[in-house]
Amino acid sequence: MTNIHIKEQWNRLDPTTQQWLMDNPGCVVLPRTLTAIFNKETSENADVDMHGEAVLTDEDREFILVKAREAEATGGRADYRFFDSAQP
């Protein structure tokens, strides 16, 4: 059985998918549309149920919850920020 690996694949997910996950941190089952997007963006082949949905592990749900809290604490800003290192 192949599980989804949200934590390991987070940076490969597009911002819209990341945002959906952070907006729905209590989601236990990843809807089939997002499961398909996840599999496409990460080249994984996560197991799905008869409805095309994938079950998230406890580790995945905890990771998403942490990301959602981080985004809330930073006002929804992205994790990665560009800092100009050139001296004036």
Image (cartoon, rainbow, N blue to C red):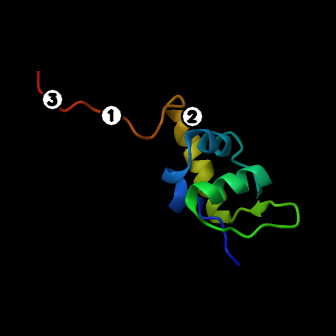
Q: Is residue 81 above or below residue 3?
A: above
Q: In the displayed image of the protein, which residue is found farthest to the bottom?
A: 1
Residue at (48% x, 51% y) in the render: 11
> Distance of mark 1 from mark 3, alpha carbons?
12 Å
Q: Is residue 74 left or right of residue 27?
A: left
Near mark 3 (Cα within 10 A), the count class, few <14, some 14-19 or many ≥20, is few
Query: Residue 76: horizontal and vertical position, in percent?
Result: 54, 31
Q: Is residue 49 left or right of residue 57?
A: right
**Residue 38 makes an appearance in the image:** yes
Q: Secondary structure at mark 2?
A: helix
Residue at (61% x, 66% y) in the render: 44
Foreground label between 2 and 3: 3
> Distance of mark 2 from mark 3, alpha carbons?
30 Å
Quadrant of res 48: bottom right
Residue type, mark 2 in image = Glu
Q: Which badge, 1 or 2, comes first in the chain's sequence?
A: 2
Q: Nearer the viewer, residue 78 or 74?
A: 78
The residue that mark 1 highlights is 82
Query: Residue 67: horizontal and vertical position, in percent?
Result: 55, 46
Quadrant of res 30: bottom right
Residue type, mark 1 in image = Phe
The residue that mark 2 highlights is 72
The residue that mark 3 highlights is 86
Q: Nearer the viewer, residue 3 or 75?
A: 3
Q: Is residue 36 above or below residue 77?
A: below
Foreground label between 1 and 2: 1
Near mark 2 (Cα within 10 A), the count class, few <14, some 14-19 or many ≥20, is few
